[in-house]
């Protein structure tokens, strides 16, 4: 039993005897328990610890009282709720039977009559709750229990209580309410003001799945599902199952409308429509067939008049058809041509895109020739090599003017934004040197340029002048629309369009970046492992439609580089590969690997990350990420493996080696503030408070572990000579030496029972793994016979894992440890072999079955004898690419 479960059992021992875990969801874990006072079985739900920490007991228990008064035959009542040893819990009846999810997993599709009957009962429960001011917010098959053929809705109002109690801090912690398949469009866009019609949409999704076998919107990832909820119109359920009656098809179509106002006004109305045979509803999807054509009025007269009318009508139809043929007759399609782009003796600078001119005739980039950095240009017709553009010394991030006559770029020497003629000559300053520090300009219209910088996005006249900040839009690679009405850029991790006239941002694509709008009516963007995606866009209406399509693989995108550039006539320059993105050491990926089979890649923007550490519950990962604008300093981030939320924790200085507290509420790390050394700090993991110093002393302090009793372990030293120390968090500032020696010792890890310590030391020359007693280093056992670093204990304390550097691949080893009656270290065995991006950059999952590791971009996990295939890094010029784009991503 886990430590959390043991604490829970002890905390509730006087009221409930916990028998076993029934299941776990996004918000809570449910246990079968025995109510000691009333001698009955109950379902006891315990909020996840990190969620409980955000909400707080007083606020949660206050909000949950609203749901305790709901009394309906199809609503599972609330028996009890409370707080015990920091746990928040609520108690409901234990229902013998199964969830609707279990029934669907067994049968997949249910009978039409049975489905309608079940959903009508649920709709009745919803209507009752809505009339009492309660919205469920999380209707899904898992929350509908089926007992003796009748449904009972569980967790009624719990999502509301959690949302109301947590308020805006939910997003900061990476927690989300609702399940993607059943979210309404307004939930998918994080609208906090939900109405009862959101529940109606979710209930319709459940009925759709009961009839069709799948929800109305599916996809390979939560992001893809949310995208389709926002953009796609679901197929009529009758297209999948022809036996569904027309009135049920129509009722579903109305309930699944994207605009809440277009849905049923109440859950009761939805339920009634499902059994009203005459109910109809016209939608775009129901009018796909050919409509009858009415004859002109003259056709109702004499036979001659009828002939004349028909003849005239026929001529008119023929003329229309002929004209349509002329308009739509296919024009000759030029062949798609792919060419390798050689940059010759010039080396493109990391993080600077290769830009193509709007007419597709010129290519420019920031690069170096020898020791000189500048902007280099080549005409595709007539020039074999790139040449320096005079006046562009120290230039980076070039962009062409719409008329192809100018190049705007960042001058690194004084951090200004300037423009120069493509033929060279004197430069004109647009944004002078100063505090704005411009990056990534885009010259979108004849008269205006947008650019990014450390303080956000700005717009400025192409002739120069005072830049205008754009505080409501973020990101690093802005794109000014061709009509100058707005700018595409990032809003958090989402792609938005900011409209200048309305001063409003419109969400277009979740979890996307580096957008470009092209004249074919497509929006291009980077997402999902640096692939280039296309989706149809109606920029005038500020929306996208249809499903996104992956049109290019392996685009070397980075925080300050799109990895692609496109002309207005379809010439694409594609940086194929993984690149380095201007990040020290190049970009890498974080992989979670199960040696028994299976690898997951954390869906994160391109960057270089290191020192990943799992949270105690295994749900989240903390790591450090190299900054692209602060000289290689690093910031700390967390990533929620369930919701996919990527949250920044630190914002200044150089921050390293994050370590979770045993309860997952805080993160310990070291930070360089003065430049004279690194000290120990701690900060709430949910960003709810400031960081505070734990230990400030000479040399560098590097944290290793945070033990259950509040002890932290760290190593301290300079110049490759460190010793091992411990310190109580409650007694910060007072460190105790665990082991000091003439050689180097680092990374002190303690077994789960607190009796043995593993660490790396250079006692025998090279770095090896050793074990000693803890907290007093008495016995001594060598673990790694031929080199090792970065040890981790197995959860049961019966094995130590460590890495050994290799050529060409690195290996993860496990050494089994016998501990009774004496410590015996067995010969290490290979667990995995791969091309790691620094063998210290790893951690073992709390379940002891998986591990996370940073790998160089392009590297893949390999077996003990296999090797990863190399990844090419090149620039391609693809001419006439619009024909390929239209083929891959046709308009809906």
Image (spheres, helix red, strand yellow):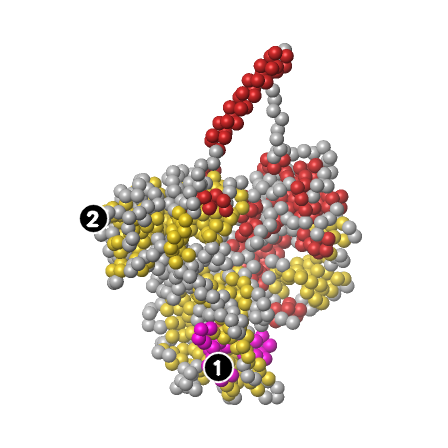
User: Which residue is at a point 54% across and 52% down the rendered structure image?
Assistant: 223
x then y, percent, for residue 839 = 46, 73
Residue drawn at 64 percent across, 68 percent down: 5
Residue 484: x percent and y percent? Answer: 37, 39
Looking at the rendering, the stretch of residues picked out in magenta corresponds to 783-809
Residue at the outermost right position: 148
Q: Which comes sooner in the sequence, label 1 or label 2?
A: 2
117 within the magenta span: no
On the image, numbered disc 1 is attached to which residue? Answer: 769
- Packing grade of label 1 (10 A; few <14, some 14-19, many >=20) is many
Q: CA distance from mark 1 to mark 2?
A: 62 Å
Would you say residue 793 sits in the magenta stretch? Answer: yes
| Numbered disc total | 2
Q: Position of residue 274 (x, y in %)?
A: 71, 39
At mark 1, the secondary structure is strand
Residue occupying image coordinates x 35% and y 48%: 356
Which residue is nearer to you in this view: 249 or 678? Answer: 249
Q: Which residue is mark 2?
A: 426
């Amino acid at each position: 039993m886990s430590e959390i479960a043991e604490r829970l059992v002890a905390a509730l021992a006087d009221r409930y005897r916990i028998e076993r875990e029934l299941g776990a969801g996004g918000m809570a874990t449910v246990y079968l328990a025995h109510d000691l006072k009333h001698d009955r079985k109950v379902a006891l739900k315990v909020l996840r610890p990190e969620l409980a920490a955000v909400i707080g007991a007083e606020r949660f228990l206050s909000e949950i009282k609203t749901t305790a008064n709901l009394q309906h035959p199809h609503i599972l009542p609330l028996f009890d709720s409370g707080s015990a040893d920091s746990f928040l819990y609520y108690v409901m009846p234990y229902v013998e039977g199964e969830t609707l999810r279990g029934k669907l997993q067994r049968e997949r599709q249910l009978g039409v009559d049975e489905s309608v009957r079940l959903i009508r009962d649920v709709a009745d429960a919803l209507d009752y709750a809505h009339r009492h001011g309660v919205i469920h917010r999380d209707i899904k098959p898992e929350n509908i229990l089926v007992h003796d053929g009748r449904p009972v809705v569980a967790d009624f109002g719990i999502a509301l209580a959690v949302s109301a109690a947590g308020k805006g801090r939910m997003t900061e912690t990476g927690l989300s309410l609702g399940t993607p398949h059943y979210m309404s469009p307004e939930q998918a866009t994080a609208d906090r003001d939900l109405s009862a019609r959101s529940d109606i949409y979710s209930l319709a999704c459940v009925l759709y799945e009961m009839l069709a076998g799948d929800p109305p919107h599916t996809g390979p990832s939560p992001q893809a599902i949310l995208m389709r909820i926002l953009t796609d119109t679901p197929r009529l359920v009758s297209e999948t199952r022809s036996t569904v009656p027309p009135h049920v098809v129509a009722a579903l179509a109305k309930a699944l409308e994207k605009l809440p106002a277009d849905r049923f006004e109440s859950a009761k109305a939805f339920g009634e429509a499902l059994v009203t045979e005459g109910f109809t509803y016209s939608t775009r999807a129901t009018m796909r067939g050919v409509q009858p054509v009415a004859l002109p009025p003259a056709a109702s007269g004499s036979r001659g008049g009828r002939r004349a009318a028909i003849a005239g009508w026929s001529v008119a139809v023929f003329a229309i058809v002929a004209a349509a043929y002329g308009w739509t007759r296919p024009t000759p399609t030029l062949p798609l041509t792919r060419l390798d782009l050689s940059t010759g003796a010039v080396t493109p600078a990391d993080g600077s895109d290769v830009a193509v001119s709007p007419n597709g005739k010129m290519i420019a980039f920031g690069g170096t020739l020898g020791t000189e950095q500048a902007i280099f240009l080549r005409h595709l017709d007539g020039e074999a090599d790139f040449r320096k553009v005079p006046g562009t010394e120290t230039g980076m991030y070039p962009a062409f003017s719409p008329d192809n006559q100018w190049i705007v770029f960042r001058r690194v020497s004084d951090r200004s934004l300037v423009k120069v003629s493509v033929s060279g000559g004197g430069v004109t300053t647009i944004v002078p040197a100063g505090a704005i520090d411009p990056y990534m300009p885009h010259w979108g219209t004849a008269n205006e340029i947008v650019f990014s910088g450390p303080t956000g996005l700005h717009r400025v006249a192409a002739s120069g002048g005072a830049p205008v900040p754009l505080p409501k839009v973020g990101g690093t690679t802005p794109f000014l629309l061709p009509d100058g009405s707005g700018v595409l850029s990032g809003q958090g991790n989402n792609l938005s369009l900011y409209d200048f006239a309305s001063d409003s941002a419109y969400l277009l694509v979740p979890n996307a970046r580096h957008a470009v709008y092209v004249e074919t009516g497509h929006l291009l963007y980077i997402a999902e492992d640096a692939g280039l995606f296309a989706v149809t866009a109606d920029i005038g209406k500020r929306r996208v439609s249809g499903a996104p399509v992956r049109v290019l693989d392996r685009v070397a995108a980075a925080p300050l580089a799109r990895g692609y550039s496109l002309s207005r006539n379809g010439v694409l320059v594609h940086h194929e590969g993984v690149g380095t993105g201007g990040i020290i050491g190049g970009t890498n990926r974080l992989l979670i690997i199960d040696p028994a089979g299976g690898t997951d890649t954390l869906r994160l923007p391109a960057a270089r990350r290191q020192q990943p550490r799992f949270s105690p519950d295994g749900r989240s990962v903390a790591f450090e990420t190299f900054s692209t604008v602060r000289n290689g300093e690093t910031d700390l981030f967390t990533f929620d493996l369930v919701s996919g939320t990527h949250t920044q924790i630190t914002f200044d200085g150089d921050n390293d080696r994050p370590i979770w507290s045993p309860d997952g509420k805080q993160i310990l790390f070291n930070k360089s503030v003065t430049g004279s050394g690194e000290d120990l700090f701690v900060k709430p993991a949910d960003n709810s408070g400031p960081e505070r110093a734990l230990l400030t002393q000479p040399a560098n302090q590097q944290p290793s572990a945070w033990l259950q009793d509040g002890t932290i372990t760290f190593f301290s030293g300079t110049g490759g000579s460190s010793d091992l120390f411990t310190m109580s968090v409650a007694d910060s500032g007072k460190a105790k030496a665990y082991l000091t020696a003439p050689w180097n010792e680092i990374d002190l890890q303690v077994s789960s029972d607190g009796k043995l310590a593993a660490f790396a030391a250079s006692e025998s020359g090279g770095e090896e793994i050793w074990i000693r007693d803890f907290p007093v280093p008495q016995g001594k056992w060598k673990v790694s016979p031929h080199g090792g670093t970065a040890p981790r204990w197995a959860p049961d304390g019966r094995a130590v894992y460590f890495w050994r550097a290799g050529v060409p691949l690195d290996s993860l080893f496990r050494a089994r440890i016998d501990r009774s009656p004496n410590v015996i270290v067995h010969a290490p065995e290979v667990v995995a072999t791969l091309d790691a991006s620094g063998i210290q950059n790893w951690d073992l999952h709390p379940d002891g079955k998986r591990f996370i590791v940073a790998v160089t971009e392009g590297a893949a996990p390999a077996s003990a004898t296999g090797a990863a295939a190399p990844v090419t890094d090149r620039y391609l010029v693809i001419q006439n690419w619009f024909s390929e784009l239209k083929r891959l991503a046709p308009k809906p």
